Image (cartoon, rainbow, N blue to C red):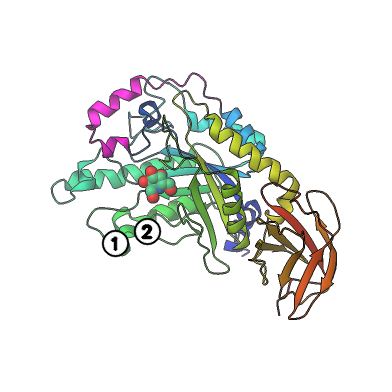
């Protein structure tokens, strides 16, 4: 009997090719403009917070515009908060009245999101928070055992709805698995995660699941930092553009720069990892210009240099005096963040013969010279960097990259 079940390598292949996705944190909290944790941090009573649903009528929400921006950014997938810790669902649910379908908006934003992404050729990711601050049993399981039980039942029922009602889903991005008073190794038992994820995989055989339901599943998720997992294990660094929160912050004064964001993307790609860059749309559903501009700049850079990122592999030699390296097949890519004043770049430790070296931004061929101590010199380049963010030099080698 031939198994129809796909191997891990088959399921994860598109993800490793994609390398770059867009995270979207959007919900009632955008109305207050103080981030997605505002209900908890300001101790807003659940019934008072729930009144926000009466005001949540995003007149300018356009999932096609979100998808178009992700394409402009060079991203290959998106992950949307279908429900965050506040309990408000952007999808229709039979087990909750606290949803965008049953309140003022009267729209299934998840359905519109899925349709738009598919039309745009983007892979579809669902973020789902297991915890829900509205349940007293989350905070005190002993005092409210029935509430704690109902919380877990809600998670199972809503994940089943998300895996059943919206067609093929590519990523299930759990969050909020931590439980007060439980150790990491107890989390999976509390949420019944083995049973939950078996159900997910039975409904969505090709899906990939992150490591935040208390089980490792398919990929690791370092947050606000880039930290590679061991070779062969997929991973994805998630990060915000503004530094205040994941959800919309009205007066955000500290945005990461385009050079910083591109260097994070390249760092992830150099470790065979993905970069999931977050936007926090405004209450009306539009994305703030500071985030739009940065995504478009990244997209412009990827349009020229994307072959050094998409499907990237670890490169055995480095160029740390000027930047980083990535590899793919018989090619290596030198990412020059810090352009040397003479326009001459030294790459130590290349064992291969180099057939040619090309600046991706201009097509210029560099002069390749070999020096002592296994050094390679790339010469004949301009004294000013051809790319303002990261000049990539493609090295076409006589085989897979090797270091010495
Ligand atoms: O508490 C959440 C937070 O609001 C945000 O969703 C991030 C994104 O990965 N995850 C949790 C914090 O680790």
The residue singled out by tag 1 in the image is: 186
* Residue labelled 2 has its Cβ within 8 Å of some atom of ligand 1: no
Residue range (magenta):
38-62
* Label 1, residues with CA under 10 Å away: few <14, some 14-19, many ≥20: some
Identify whether 51 is placed above or below 45: above
Query: Spatial distance from mark 1 to mark 2, Cα to Cα?
Result: 8 Å
Of the 4 image quadrants, the one containing the N terminus is bottom right
Quadrant hosting residue 17: bottom right
Question: Which residue: 62% across, 55% down?
Answer: 266
Identify whether 214 is placed above or below 388: below
Percent x, y for residue 94? 36, 32
Labels 1 and 2 touching (C-beta < 8 A): yes
Whether residue 359 sits left or right of residue 9 in the image: it is right
Residue 206 visible at all: no
Q: Which one is in front, 73 or 123?
A: 73
Q: Which one is in front, 155 or 224?
A: 224
The residue singled out by tag 2 in the image is: 214
């Amino acid at each position: 009997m031939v198994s129809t079940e796909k191997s891990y390598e088959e399921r994860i292949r598109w993800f490793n090719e994609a390398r770059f996705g867009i995270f979207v944190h959007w919900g009632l909290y955008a109305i207050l403009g103080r981030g997605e944790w505002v209900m908890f941090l300001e101790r807003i009573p659940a019934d008072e917070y729930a009144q926000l649903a009466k005001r949540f009528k995003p007149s300018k929400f356009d999932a096609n515009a979100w998808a178009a921006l992700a394409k402009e950014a060079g991203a290959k997938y998106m992950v949307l908060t279908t429900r965050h810790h506040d309990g408000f669902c952007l999808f229709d649910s039979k087990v909750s009245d606290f949803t965008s379908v049953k309140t003022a908006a009267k729209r299934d934003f998840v359905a519109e999101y899925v349709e738009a992404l598919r039309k745009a050729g983007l892979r579809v990711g669902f973020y789902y928070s297991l915890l829900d601050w509205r349940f007293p049993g989350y905070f005190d399981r002993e005092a409210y055992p029935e509430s704690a039980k109902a919380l877990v039942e809600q998670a199972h029922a809503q994940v089943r709805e998300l895996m059943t009602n919206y067609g093929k889903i590519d990523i299930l991005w759990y969050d909020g698995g931590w439980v007060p008073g439980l150790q990491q190794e107890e989390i999976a038992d509390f949420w019944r995660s083995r049973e939950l994820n078996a159900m997910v995989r039975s409904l969505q055989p090709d899906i990939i699941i992150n490591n935040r339901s208390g089980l490792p599943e398919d990929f690791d998720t370092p947050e606000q930092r880039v930290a590679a997992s061991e070779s062969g294990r997929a991973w994805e660094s998630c990060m915000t553009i503004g530094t205040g929160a994941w959800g919309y912050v009205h007066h955000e004064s500290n945005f990461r720069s385009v050079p910083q964001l591109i260097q994070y993307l390249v760092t992830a790609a150099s470790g065979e990892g993905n970069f999931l860059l977050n936007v926090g749309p405004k209450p009306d559903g539009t994305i703030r210009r500071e985030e739009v501009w940065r995504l478009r700049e990244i997209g412009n850079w990827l349009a020229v240099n994307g072959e050094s990122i998409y499907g990237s592999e670890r490169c055995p030699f480095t160029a740390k005096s000027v930047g980083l390296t990535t590899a793919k097949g018989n090619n290596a890519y030198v990412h020059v963040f810090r352009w040397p004043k003479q326009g001459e770049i030294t790459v130590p430790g290349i064992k291969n013969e180099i057939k040619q070296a090309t600046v991706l931004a201009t097509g210029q061929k560099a002069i390749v010279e070999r020096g002592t101590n296994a050094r390679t010199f790339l010469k004949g380049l301009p004294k000013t960097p051809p790319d303002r963010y990261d000049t990539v030099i493609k090295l076409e080698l006589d085989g897979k990259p090797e270091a010495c």
